């Protein structure tokens, strides 16, 4: 059983759509809640009036801090966070009041109507400012903005530096990282008349923590708060403090109203309130010898804790333990400080203080190797932990298999590292550079010296031999229930099908500790094993005489049967029969499993001690490709080798690697949570990009299994190490490709091309927070059957035409404004594609999928095909129409440039007839077209492309699907047989204020050989245009060189497409 | 308020819906089909994907009144005579499900793909599910599952 591939036991409900997540819960009479968030990032509330809002339709109750009956403050370690603030605003995600109303929409409307006046204060957003002794205090009740400071002192670093042949200093920076679980938070509370307390349900990662927090907030004993976690739609450490605050609010409302109350966040609200991974500034100074031996390391780290301390105490502690990486260094001097600011607060996120330090320290190792001209692998072999090594905290690694070099060797072999290292260095061409790099890590398992570490389970055998398993640790989606049942099945020797996992409430089982720190299988699983073993020992007296043996270990329990060990003539016994026999005699076949890790130790002032009982080791190898013109970095392949001890469920364990790598890759390259002076700019998944299925490369995963003494059957930890290595491995591959590593992540387009991140500057006039309504307002929709009828319905243009809705409904959701819509989808003539002389007439309502399905047209207009096949994804292309894309007139509209390239003509219907306008004249400027009020985009006449023309198209996005196009270029050219451009058209998209031809550049390219790319004259002309049109924009520093690059590429590659295709 | 006729998983419904009601809310709240999820509300994550008249669409970006006269299939309609479909079984077999929140939308995108292209390449599978974000699996086991479901259809 253990070690096999097993289907998850809760999977069928999930693939049938029957699993109940937080928002799927419906209780009779349930009210809906909405939060009123702060409108400023820092300051004081001078007036708070709820009377108007209370009088609004459907409103039942509005809670503010004044209603709190218990302790107003919550916090995992230090209580410094108000689920409902008093008069101070600490960050933009603070909640001032929470409304309960009959419908969600009523609750939202009332929350907006609450009258709040502020006295804004200049916040502190920069950790290097906040750490200064003179800085204003974010929380005046504490004496410093330093949440916590961990020192670590080993040996004498100054002496170590003096004795070194070389000293290198580097500063690294990491950004925010948002969990982006696909399920936004949803919690529900209802009054529990039986206990006089409350029941709480929802997307809760750690039900026992939530219980304690809610009990404290309401001033109730713990046993009057019963928490029942729903199926959890992803957490990764993220559904803890924020969800606890939400639970406090709904529990308070349930008490105030006497009714069940649900609070479900929209994605924007989730991003706004929820904590992120800590941004770090990491300063490393390292002394090393000519042979690569590390002598001394000085590490100084600042971590942005944001408005609250949350898990900063523990996140920063893990960093101080692991900050040197898995290297034996005689002299180490480390300081890490977590700092309060008025930014979004930061807390637990898969990795928990390790991805930042692994990124920095593994980048540093490759920099040392490069400086010495040494093989980075050899440098790691020389310094890496081996059996009996001493860590920076003085812990001797001798109680488990120190497998660092095994995972390293295996990953090198599996990835063919050395051959590729050479091959990639030689593969550079005009367009791309390639590289391969690796990173290794060690990671302490479970909580270590954070605190006492125990877990719990119940294994209960019924009279027919079937079994319940209950755990005091929560399933977060990773497959814990399945692993727990496998462990019980293995220990009891019964089949998995004979076990049912029961979802407990906090009243059912005792606190097994949180599902954090990759401790689920290790701790929770061991508790299950202990309980199962106890059940076995209670069955033993009933089989002892039959087999004539002395102890349980003399028997083999397997597949529902009990056999004697070794040769025995004794008939095996059925476990079910023995269970029946035992039950009838009154035997107790239900057992509590309690497992407590031996205590770890930590001396705060020296940073010395046995930090964790045991460690895991991993190595990841990344292979990357950089597009030189745009700086687009893509991962080609990841090889991941992890020692996680004994693997329980191989299918689930591999899933942990694939998912962890994808998140780590996003962290390293793509995910850029944009906070500008405390204002969250990344509000939804269109602004915070995570990898799609087209961005994650092949991942080759392998386990090395070195069981050790602590976990069930020797299992250790896996969830977090899979994430912590990827960004570092990618950076080392990037350095191999480009010659220099990035000193910060994410390594995005701008970082690669111009060496720095680039964000739209924050204007001081934008001190307020832009509030979107996040719901559709009042609406009337009419559905005419003909263009004439539609025009009649809209004489003055007061209505808006609705086509696919993929843009319009998003805009209306943002504003919540009332709207009169005329849905054009029933108008037959808008949906046709007619063949005409030399081209096609395309109805405005034709979707991109319908266009792409027209193979002949797509063959004849290949630039249009290339452009529209990359719009959104299937779901969008199945609804979005060509008219909608143009009428919306976004500068990034992908269909516009090819239509301009092919000289398409747009036909516009009005009550006075039809007029025609060239596609190039349709978009006037950003978000403004030539349409007059009431007019309808009827169709577009698209001339077929000239088959003798060569063509080129390039579209740049930050990822490979679901993009907002950063820029595009469309080219068509007539070429002589020897590759000279005789005639050409070039159209830019998403670059200037509207898409259009670059006729001066076209002129300058005439008579030039395409294979040489942009001619010097053309380049000069283009530079002048770009400088004139967009030279002053914040984004031009990147956009200008990138556009020149992609146009150059497109021209060079003209030969390869079109006429010769 | 409008009266609409809609077929959902083979059952006809006549419903009065406010003009601003989304198809997603109609499914989840009016019909109690909570298998379809909301992850972003703006068509970025694909958790609300259903099949409308044969095509995968984001039900957060379609008004219920626009679905008048349409046939909708949700995750609850995937099974065949109470048995899980090949695709659902393949998801379980290959570990394509972790937290399961993206799973219903992912299944519907995969189903729409296989209905129109029974033998997709890996690239085509990745493209077809590229509008469905998953944060748990790194997509590999999902791609494997769709591929296996396509292969088993041959046998």
Image: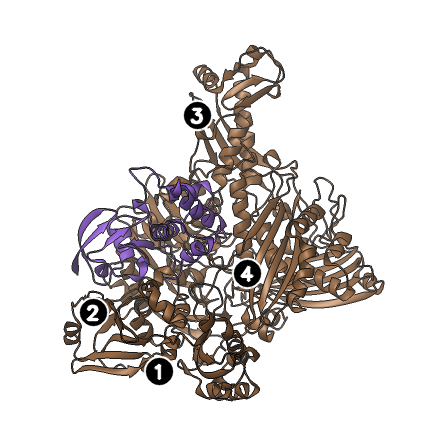
Q: Which chain is brown in the rendering?
A: A
User: Residue visible at 48% across and 60% down?
Assistant: A690
Vertical placement of A495 versus A746: above or below? above
Q: What element carries label 2?
A: helix
Instruction: Work out whether residue B51 or residue A316 is closer to the camera in this orientation and state it.
Output: B51
Separation of disc 2 and disc 4 at Cα? 47 Å
Are labels 2 and 4 assigned to the same chain? yes
On the image, which quarter does residue A871 sit in? bottom left
In this image, A704 relative to A17: left or right?
A: right
**Label 4's element?**
helix
Q: Position of residue A692 (x, y in %)?
A: 46, 59
Q: Which of marks 2 and 3 is in front?
A: 2
Q: Residues within 10 Å of mark 4 (few under 14, many from 20)?
A: many
- Is residue A426 visible to us here? yes
CA distance for labels 3 and 1: 73 Å
**Residue shown at 65% from the left, 62% from the top:** A424
Which is nearer the N-term, disc 2 or disc 3? 3
According to the image, label 2 marks what residue? A829
CA separation in Å, label 2 and label 1: 24 Å
Q: Nearer the viewer, mark 1 or mark 4?
A: 1
Q: Give the mark nearer the N terminus: 4 vs 3.
A: 3
For mark 2, does the 10 Å Cα neighbourhood hold few (<14), some (14 to 19), or many (20 or more) residues? some
Residue annotated with mark 4: A667
């Amino acid at each position: 059983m253990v070690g096999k591939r097993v289907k998850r036991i809760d999977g069928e409900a999930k693939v049938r759509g029957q699993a109940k997540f937080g928002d799927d819960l419906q209780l009779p009479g349930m009210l809906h809640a909405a939060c009123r968030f702060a409108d400023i990032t820092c300051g004081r509330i001078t007036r708070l009036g709820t009377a108007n809002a209370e009088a609004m339709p459907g409103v039942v109750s509005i809670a503010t801090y004044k209603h709190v009956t218990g302790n107003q403050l919550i916090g995992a370690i230090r209580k410094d966070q108000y689920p409902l603030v008093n008069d101070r605003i600490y960050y933009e995600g603070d909640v001032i009041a929470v409304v309960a109303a009959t419908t969600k929409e009523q609750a939202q409307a009332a929350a907006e109507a609450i009258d709040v006046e502020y006295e804004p204060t200049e916040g502190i957003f920069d950790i290097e400012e906040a750490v200064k002794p003179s800085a204003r205090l974010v929380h005046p009740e504490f004496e410093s903005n330093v949440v916590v400071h961990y020192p670590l002192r080993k040996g004498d670093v100054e002496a170590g530096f003096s004795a070194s042949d070389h000293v290198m200093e580097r500063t690294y920076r990491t950004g925010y990282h948002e969990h982006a679980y696909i399920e936004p938070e949803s919690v529900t509370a209802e009054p529990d008349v039986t206990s006089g307390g409350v029941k709480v349900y929802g997307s809760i990662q750690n039900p026992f923590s939530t219980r304690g927090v809610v009990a404290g907030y309401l001033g109730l004993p713990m046993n009057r708060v019963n928490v029942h976690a729903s199926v959890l739609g992803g957490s990764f450490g993220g559904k803890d403090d924020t969800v606890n605050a939400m639970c406090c609010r709904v529990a308070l409302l349930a008490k105030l109203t006497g009714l069940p109350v649900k609070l479900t966040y929209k994605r924007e609200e989730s991003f706004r309130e929820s904590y992120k991974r800590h941004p770090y500034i990491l300063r490393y100074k390292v002394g090393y010898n000519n042979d690569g031996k590390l002598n001394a390391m000085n590490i100084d780290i600042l971590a942005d804790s944001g408005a609250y301390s949350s898990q900063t105490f523990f996140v920063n502690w893990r960093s101080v333990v692991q900050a040197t990486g898995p290297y034996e260094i005689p002299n180490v001097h480390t300081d890490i400080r977590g700092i309060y600011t008025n930014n979004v607060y930061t807390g637990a996120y898969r990795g928990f203080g390790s991805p930042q330090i692994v990124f920095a320290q593994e980048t540093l190792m490759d920099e040392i190797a490069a400086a010495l001209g040494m093989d980075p692998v050899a440098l790691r072999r020389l310094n890496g932990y081996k059996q009996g090594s001493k860590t920076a905290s003085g812990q001797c690694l001798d109680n488990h298999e120190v497998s660092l070099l095994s995972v390293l060797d295996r990953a090198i072999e599996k990835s063919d590292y050395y051959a590729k290292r050479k091959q990639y260095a030689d593969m550079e061409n005009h367009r791309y550079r390639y590289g391969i790099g690796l990173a290794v890590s060690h990671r302490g398992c479970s909580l270590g010296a954070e605190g006492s570490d125990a877990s719990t389970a119940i294994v209960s055998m019924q009279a027919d031999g079937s079994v319940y398993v209950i755990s005091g640790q929560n399933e977060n989606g990773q497959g814990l229930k399945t692993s727990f049942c496998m462990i019980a099945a293995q220990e009891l020797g019964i089949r998995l099908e004979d076990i049912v996992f029961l979802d407990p409430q906090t009243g059912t089982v005792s606190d097994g500790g949180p599902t954090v720190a990759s401790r689920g299988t290790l701790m929770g699983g061991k508790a299950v094993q202990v309980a199962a073993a106890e059940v076995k020992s209670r069955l033993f007296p009933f089989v002892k005489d039959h087999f004539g043996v002395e102890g349980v270990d003399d028997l083999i329990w397997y597949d529902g049967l009990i056999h004697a060990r070794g040769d025995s003539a004794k008939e095996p016994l059925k476990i079910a029969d023995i269970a029946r026999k035992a039950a009838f005699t009154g035997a107790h076949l239900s057992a509590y499993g309690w497992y407590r890790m031996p205590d770890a130790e930590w001396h705060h002032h020296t940073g010395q001690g046995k930090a964790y009982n045991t460690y895991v080791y991993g190595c990841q190898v990344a292979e990357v490709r950089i597009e030189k013109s745009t700086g687009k970095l893509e991962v080609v392949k990841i090889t991941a080798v992890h020692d996680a001890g004994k693997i329980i469920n191989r299918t689930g364990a591999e899933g942990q690697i694939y998912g962890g790598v994808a998140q780590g890759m996003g962290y390293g390259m793509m995910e850029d949570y944009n906070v500008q002076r405390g204002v969250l700019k990344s509000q939804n998944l269109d602004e915070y990009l995570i990898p799609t299925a087209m961005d994650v490369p092949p991942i080759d995963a392998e386990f090395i299994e070195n069981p050790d003494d602590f976990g069930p059957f020797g299992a250790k930890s896996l969830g977090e190490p899979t994430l912590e290595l990827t960004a570092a491995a990618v950076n080392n591959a990037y350095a191999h490709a480009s010659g220099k590593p990035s000193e910060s992540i994410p390594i995005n387009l701008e970082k690669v091309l111009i060496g720095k991140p680039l964000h739209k500057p924050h204007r001081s006039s934008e001190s307020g927070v832009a509030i979107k309504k996040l719901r559709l307002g009042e609406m009337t929709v009419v559905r005419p059957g003909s263009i004439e009828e539609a025009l009649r319905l809209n004489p003055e243009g007061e209505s808006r035409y609705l086509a696919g809705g993929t843009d319009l409904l998003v805009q209306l959701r943002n504003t919540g404004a009332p709207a009169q819509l005329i849905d054009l989808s029933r108008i037959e003539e808008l949906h046709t594609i007619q063949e005409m002389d030399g081209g096609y007439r395309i109805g405005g309502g034709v979707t991109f999928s319908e266009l792409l399905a027209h193979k002949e047209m797509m063959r004849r207009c290949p630039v249009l095909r290339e452009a529209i096949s990359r719009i959104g994804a299937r779901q969008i292309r199945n609804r979005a129409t060509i008219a909608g894309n143009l009428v919306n007139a976004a500068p990034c509209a992908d269909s516009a440039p090819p239509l301009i390239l092919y000289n398409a003509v747009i036909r516009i219907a009005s009550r006075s007839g039809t007029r025609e306008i060239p596609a190039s004249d349709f978009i006037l400027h950003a978000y403004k077209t030539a349409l007059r009020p009431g007019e309808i985009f009827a169709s577009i006449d698209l001339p077929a492309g000239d088959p003798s023309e060569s063509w080129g198209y390039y579209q740049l996005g930050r990822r490979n699907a679901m993009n907002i196009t950063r820029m595009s270029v469309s080219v068509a050219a007539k070429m002589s047989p020897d590759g000279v451009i005789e005639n050409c058209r070039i159209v830019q998209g998403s670059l200037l204020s509207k898409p259009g031809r670059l006729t001066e550049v076209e002129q300058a390219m005439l008579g030039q050989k395409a294979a040489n790319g942009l001619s010097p004259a053309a380049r000069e002309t283009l530079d002048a245009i770009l400088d004139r049109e967009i030279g002053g924009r914040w984004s031009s520093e990147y956009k200008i060189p990138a556009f020149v690059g992609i146009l150059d590429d497109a021209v060079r590659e003209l030969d390869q497409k079109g006429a010769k295709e | 308020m409008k009266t609409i006729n809609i077929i959902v998983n083979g059952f006809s419904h006549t419903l009065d819906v406010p003009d601003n009601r989304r198809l997603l809310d109609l499914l989840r709240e009016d019909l109690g089909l909570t298998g379809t999820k909301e992850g972003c509300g703006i068509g970025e994550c694909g958790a609300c994907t259903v099949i409308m008249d044969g095509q995968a669409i984001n039900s957060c970006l379609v008004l219920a009144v626009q679905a008048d006269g349409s046939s909708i299939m949700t995750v609850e309609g995937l099974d065949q005579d109470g048995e899980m479909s090949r695709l659902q079984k393949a998801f379980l077999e290959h570990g394509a499900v972790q937290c399961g929140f993206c799973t219903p939308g992912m299944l519907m995108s995969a189903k729409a793909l296989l209905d129109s292209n029974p033998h997709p390449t890996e690239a085509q599978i990745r493209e077809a599910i590229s509008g469905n974000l998953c944060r748990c699996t790194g997509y590999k086991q999902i791609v494997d599952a769709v591929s296996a479901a396509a292969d088993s259809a041959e046998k």
